[in-house]
Image (cartoon, rainbow, N blue to C red):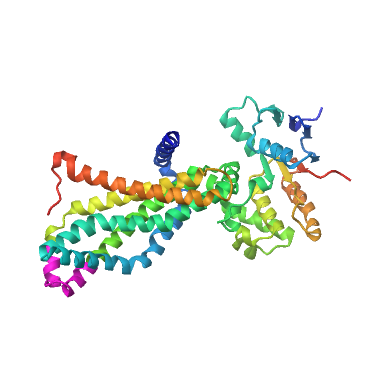
Amino acid sequence: MLPQALREVEGGVKLSLNVAVRLPKLVRPPIFESFLRQVYFTGVTAATGVILRACALGVIIIAVMMNMLDADVDLAVKILLLLVFRELGPLAAAVVVILRTGTAVSAEMAIMRVSGQTRALRYLGIDLYDYLVLPRVAGIMLATAALTFYVQFLAVLGGLVLSPFIIEASFDELTGRFFDLFTPVDCYYSVVKSLLFGFVVAASCCWHGLNPPDLTQNAVPKVVTKAVMQSMMLVLAVNAVFAYLVFGILFFGLIKANV
Amino acid sequence: MTDLALRYSRRTPRHEVQVSVPQGAVTHVHLPDDDAKAHLVTAMLKARAEPGEELELFGESTAGLGMRQREKVRGRIGAVSPIVGLITNLNAWENISLPAAYHGAPPLPEVAQLAHDVLAAFGAEPRYFFARVPDELGTLERKIASFIRLLVAAPELMVFDALEDGLSYAECRYAARFEAEYRARQPQGTVLYVDTKEES
């Protein structure tokens, strides 16, 4: 158990370093094409599926909180900013990315490995990190950031537009208070966090895809399960550590949530 | 004495395999079983001998080769083999052009011209052929796509691994065209046919 965990950590670190070193190769035509495909698959095709869910997210959170906490406008907007914008938006986007892209990437890579396609690439002088890992990691990172922004925008908009039907507050009042509380830190925080989410999901799925437990077809579902579970755990860990670093101890606590 | 493109030997408790292929010649090698065939082809493609094997490529032992030299030797060998299959999520054109696009040479128009010429020799319609993914191609078509992808790299030693396997009787007529197309582009090249069937 422990050697396996250490092997996974070592593999993850190596994979991360390899991706960082090879980033300039992203401009090569087949790698860039693969990157664009990944962005399209992860970001664009996922976007239509989250419209309703993202809008509902903002409204449901506010409606539940209203009933439980008997909240006023101020608290409603704080909930929208703190919970929906900063935490649930990026998490919801990460979950969508894990379920849609993480499963696809890990299964695709495991199938390539099991069927000898990765070996064929090596014989053609094509580096697996260049052609398979780099465009997927970069593409998933970028698409996760874009999807996070999209989910946040829809969730906040949904919350601001539909909440007046549930609580006694006007749209103008809610919007005004939202922009009073909103700081650029919220934006940077979301972007950096979503890029990290994208990175850990992509790295985990690529690593598991390229390292199946055995080279049989049975290994593919095992790989997907492992990749998804580990991605989810990593996303939650990154979320906790990142929140603590940014709003806890970083710069001696000078950066604080503006609430 | 003729220079050898390949000298390979492998000794196992069950059998001993000795293969010598003169440069520029066409050689047919019949191996005792699939395992022996896979070992030979893999050793050539990796330019590396496993324990119990000896391998010389183009007159040089591969034992003491450094990583770069090994890479160079590998670049001189191509194999139409199930071991080097097509990438299933790329269409035929993307498969053919992938190595050239990745390495930046030769230019893609040149690759396209070569592909058109070879497909014309096999009587295939390029636009229809290029657009399909490997699962939509027949066995012969997959072999043709692999072959074109190799021709782009102009290998000095071309290995045909069980070329007629999976082909219908009618399709086997086309098998000879592979060698002819290779010869037309690499007159000094070496051709090695590998299979596990006994000669009748």
Question: Considering only vertical position in the picture, is A9 above or below A50?
Answer: above
Find residue B185 and report its horizontal and vertical position in percent.
Answer: 72, 47
- Residue furthest top as drawn: B64
Q: Nearer the viewer, residue A58 or A68?
A: A68
Give the overall secondary structure of the magenta segment: helix
Q: Is residue A157 visible?
A: no
Can you say which quadrant of the picture contains the C terminus of chain A?
A: bottom left
User: Is residue B30 shown above or below A70?
Assistant: above
- In the picture as drawn, the residue positioned furthest to the bottom comes out as A165
Q: Is residue A24 magenta?
A: no
For the image, the number of numbered tags is 0
Q: Is residue A41 left or right of residue B154?
A: left
Residue at image position (18%, 40%) is A249
Does residue A126 appear anywhere in the picture?
A: yes
Residue A28, given in percent of the width and then of the height, sits at: 47, 48
Residue A177 falls inside the magenta stretch:
yes
Q: Residue at x 58, y 50 (%)?
A: A217
Q: Is residue A142 left or right of residue B35?
A: left
Q: Position of residue B173 (x, y in %)?
A: 81, 57
Q: Which residues are magenta?
A: A158-178
Quadrant (top left/top right/bottom left/bottom right) for the N terminus of chain A = top left
Residue A213 place in picture, x, y as percent: 52, 43
Q: Quadrant of residue A92?
A: bottom left
- Nearer to the camera, A15 or A56: A56
Q: Would residue A219 appear left or right of B16 to someone viewing this image?
A: left
